Structure formats: C-alpha cells, structure tokens
Amino acid sequence: MKETSARLLRLLTLLQTRREWSGTELADRLGVTTRTIRRDVGKLRDLDYPVFASMGTSGGGYRLGSGAQLPPLLLDDEEAVAVAISLRTATGSSVSGIGETALRALLKVEQVLPSRLRNRVAALDITTVPNTGSGPTVDLETLTAIATACRDRQRLRFSYASHGGSPSDRDVEPHQLVTWGRRWYLVAWDVGRDGWRTFRVDRVRPQVPVGPRFTPRSVPGGDAAEFVARSVAQRWPAQATVLVQVAADSPEMRGWLSYGRVEPVSASSCHLHVGGETLQDIVFMLGSLTVDFTAVEPPSLGAALVEAAERLRRAGS
C-alpha cells in the first residue's frame, strides 16, 4: 500500500512536468507496466484529479487537466529552497495584495520543509524592507489576466490611460510581461496602431472576453526586457547622449541595456542614450560609468558634469 501511494505521487508529479506523456514513457519512468499505469490513472481519477487519456499506440497518451483542487507537489531540494526564497522576496512586491498572500504561502512551505532545507533558507536571512514609496501597484487579477493571454497567445482588449490620463481602447497581441524597477510593463503588438508598444500594467483595465488566438511575432531586437528599457528611456523628460570609449558589445555596456540604448560608433566606441526625470538624475547615473566618456548632448550636459565633479572634488578634499 505504501509503495502504491508513493508511486501515485510520483505519477502525479510527472504529469505536472509536461503537457502530455505516453503510457510507455510513464511506465519506463516508474518501472512498471503500461497496464499498471492505466490502473494508477484510474485511482487518480477516483481522487478527483482530472487525468485525460487519448488512445493510440505505445499505451496511449495522458494529460493532467485543471481540477477543483490543487494537486500535491513533489519538489527536489533545490526547487524547495528556490520557492521559499521567492516567496520571501515577494512579500515586498508591487503587486497589490500579493505580499500577505506570499507570506501565508511561505509559512505553509517552511512548515513542511525538512530541517536541513529549513536551515538553508534561514541561513540566507532575507529581510524585506517595506516599500514606503508612492510607486504604482498592480492589481493581481489584471496581472493574471494579461499573463494568461500571453501564455495562450490570445488577443487582449483593454482600456488604457496614457501618462496624461487620456483614455483609449486597445486591441493587442500580448507578447510578454516585464518588470522594470517597481513597475510592470506589457510588450505587445498594437493591432490598431500596427506596431510594437509597451504598456504600463497599472494603467491597463482588461475587457472580457479575450480575442482570437494569434501567431506570435518576433519582438524587435529579440529581447522584451531590452525593448522595454529602450521604450521607457525615450519617454523620460530629460534625455542625454554620451560617447563612451568602449565597444557597444563590451561587458561594461551590457548592464546599461536596462537603462537606455547603446549604439555602436566604431570598433572601440559607442553612443549611450539615457533618460531621467532631470538632467541631474542623468549625471548621477553617468557617474557610475567605469570607463571614459564624453558629453555629446544636450549642450548643458557638459557643464552639469563639471559642476558635479567639482562638488565631489571639494568633498574629497
């Protein structure tokens, strides 16, 4: 009986890792016959787990559907630690209501962790500093609806408020959700405007039902996160460009892809385009560059850099 129960849990875990398994594959993994797999699938159904079967050679195919209850999860050591750490950090999330939910889930996970794993998680000693800023929060239901549309490749219709508050109705092909700072963005192909756009999720109000399925397009540059960084950087009130004395694909410049746009100039130099709320914010950012650079535009950038350098020199002396 104990062996059968353990095998059912292992079978359930396998069904959760892939969309569909053949009976032969499951039998090989569990070291049993396909007939035993059929009997075990019947037992899972008796426990109200929706396991769907398709007829065919090699013992047919099996797929775990959505049910009324959450199946038990069997995690290896590394997966269990990763889940616990993720839940701890999620308590400071910008998603409204997720912090308390993550904390409740973390308590349940830590309660059942073996002592060796509980000690590993505790050794990291993660403390989340409560967010006291005025940054926007994202509604969990909105985030889930968008993520589902991205996963299922279904067109999404929503009301959207611009930076100035002007409303508009959008019909998009959602590509991917991206977090940048404390904000969530949706990268999508705007059907009505025939182009790629980024949308602040806290300004999105989804409309139901969702639209038809679509064939995914390739996001410009191939990286949704870099696309968001470039789009957001271009919207800042203050903009600046500097000439950096390293190649655009050098390790020193890769980290800047999350803050602006890097444009090759020669084999050993590139333009870095960045934005910020004010010119002083940009000067602060550029102060973290570890390689030589020259101000290009705006004309006032050079003077602002010199003023900041003099202030730092006085502080050092």
Image (cartoon, rainbow, N blue to C red):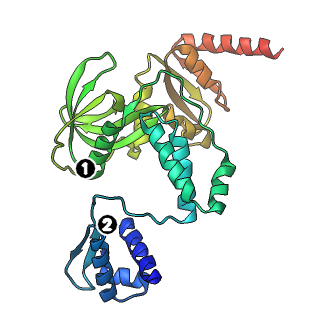
Amino acid bearing label 1: Arg
Above or below, 128 against 112 in this view is: above
Mark nearer the N terminus (1 vs 2): 2
Distance in Å between CA atoms under marks 1 and 2: 16 Å
Q: Quadrant of residue 48?
A: bottom left
| Crowding at mark 1 (Cα within 10 Å: few <14, some 14-19, many 20+) | some
x, y percentage for residue 314?
78, 11
Q: Is residue 86 left or right of residue 216?
A: right
Above or below, 231 against 98 in this view is: above
Amino acid bearing label 2: Arg
Which residue is located at x 54 percent, y 23 percent? 132
Which residue is located at x 39 percent, y 75 percent? 11
Looking at the image, which is closer to me, 144 or 169? 144
| Crowding at mark 2 (Cα within 10 Å: few <14, some 14-19, many 20+) | few
x, y percentage for residue 144?
32, 43
Helix, strand or loop at label 1? It is loop
Q: In the orientation shown, which residue stands out farthest toward the right?
A: 317
Q: From where the camera sits, is residue 116 visible?
A: yes
Looking at the image, which is closer to me, 210 or 14? 14
Mark linked to residue 153: 1
x, y percentage for residue 133?
52, 22
| Residue to which mark 2 is pinned | 19
Above or below, 77 against 280 in this view is: below
Q: Is residue 80 left or right of residue 46?
A: right
Which residue is located at x 22 percent, y 51 percent? 215
x, y percentage for residue 91?
51, 39
Q: From where the camera sits, is residue 265 visible?
A: no
